[in-house]
Image (cartoon, rainbow, N blue to C red):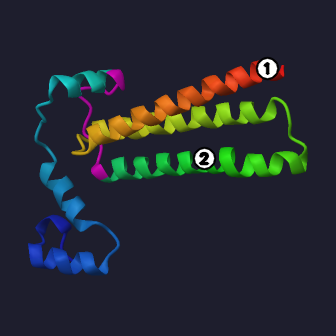
Amino acid sequence: MDDAATLDAAELTEVAGRCPIDHAAIAAEQARGGAPAERSLADQRMRRLLRIDPHAPKVSLIDAHNAFSRSVAVSAVRCLFTYVALPLLAPVVGLTGAFGPLVTILLSAVSVTAIIISARRFFGSDHPWRWVHAVIGAGLILILGVSVVLDVLNLANVL
């Protein structure tokens, strides 16, 4: 089979209908390959905040999407555990006191780490949706921060 970058539009549509791989994304990735990007001041500042080397090669768009999927999965597991499993299992197993807040603080830290890794991938690839991701990620980090503060206060009252 031909490489995705050499397929014309009709062949690309036919291949995409049969294959679970996004050939259009691969073709776009290969087409944008070597051109250096002119970045806005906001992009430069965000890349500096995320500690992305300005001379590093671009991260692929597929890696950015995979990192985003992983961060969403980590956040989903955290939410399920914090708001479904822990309240249901705590009385059954006898988990009381400091256990709940400690676990949710730990899970919040893991979620923030996953969000930051995902943001690094989005900005490292100059993904077109990087700023949307940044706003959503900042909102989630803010919510997680409030949750951690409430858990710390709850933990201080328990001890």
- Relative to 117, say whether 81 is above or below: below
Q: Is residue 121 left or right of residue 2?
A: right
Query: In what element is the residue under mark 2?
Result: helix
Magenta residues, start to end: 49-61
Judge left or right: residue 25 versus residue 109: left
Query: Of the residues under marks 2 and 1, which one precedes in the sequence?
Result: 2
Image quadrant holding the N terminus, namely: bottom left
Mark carried by residue 79: 2
Residue 129 place in picture, x, y as percent: 26, 45
**Secondary structure, magenta segment, majority class:** loop
Measure the alpha-carbon separation of dots 2 and 1.
23 Å
Q: Nearer the viewer, mark 2 or mark 1?
A: 1
Where in the figure is residue 145, as x and y percent of width and height?
Answer: 54, 27
Queried whether the magenta region covers residue 50, the answer comes back as yes
| Closer to the camera in the image, 31 or 109 | 109
Quarter residue 158 falls in:
top right
Say which residue label 1 marks.
157
Residue 16 spot, x, y in % from top left = 25, 75
Towards the viewer: 95 or 5: 95
**From what the image shows, is residue 124 above or below residue 23?**
above
| Image point (60%, 50%), residue name | 77
Is residue 118 visible from the viewing direction of this image?
Answer: yes
